Image (cartoon, rainbow, N blue to C red):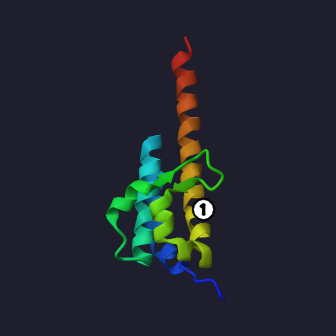
Amino acid sequence: MDKISYTKFEKMLESEYRERLNESKRIDEVGNTFVEYAFKLLSMIKPDVNEALLEELAFDPDNEKGYRLHEHLRRAFEEELENSDLPAILERMAKAALHRYQHIVKDDDRTEVFRKAP
């Protein structure tokens, strides 16, 4: 069976998503932006997805994929996660968020060093 592709949805969201990530000044904004746009993507795939499942999606910089889908959301998208490029798209989105996250952390560390200088 051929895999289904959702890259057209990814492309529709990509520039706005990257712009919002680049505007993020705090670490929590990065996570919120990832969750918002990943959920927009999921809503494009399944327009009737329950918004309560938004709580089941998380940006996770410590996870190798960069995100976590909790059980109910995984079950709601089980077929798409197994038979499409959805996991790869979510990983790309998480990777972009992780890049911004690391940039903010580095800037905060650098600012902290300057504050400590006499």
* Image quarter (top left, top right, bottom left or bottom right) of the N terminus: bottom right
Q: Which residue is mark 1?
A: 91
Residue depicted at x 58% and y 46%: 61
Can residue 58 be spotted in the picture?
A: yes
Across and down, in percent, residue 17 comes to: 45, 62
Q: Is residue 15 above or below residue 96?
A: below
Q: Is residue 64 above or below residue 81?
A: above
| 115 or 64, nearer to the observer | 64
Across and down, in percent, residue 114 comes to: 55, 22
Q: Judge left or right: residue 67 versus residue 37.
A: right
Residue depicted at x 44% and y 70%: 42
Can residue 25 be spotted in the picture?
A: no
| 88 or 46, nearer to the observer | 46
Q: Amino acid at mark 1?
A: Glu
Q: Is residue 57 above or below residue 103?
A: below
Residue depicted at x 55% and y 61%: 93
Q: How many marks?
A: 1
* Image quarter (top left, top right, bottom left or bottom right) of the C terminus: top right
| 95 or 75, nearer to the observer | 75
Across and down, in percent, residue 108 comes to: 53, 32
Across and down, in percent, residue 22 comes to: 48, 53
Residue depicted at x 51% and y 75%: 11
User: Which quadrant of the view contains residue 39?
Assistant: bottom left
Which residue is at the far top?
118
Q: Of helix, strand and loop, which one carries label 1? A: helix
User: Which quadrant of the view contains residue 103?
Assistant: top right
User: Callout 1: 10 Å neighbours few (<14), some, many (20+)?
Assistant: some
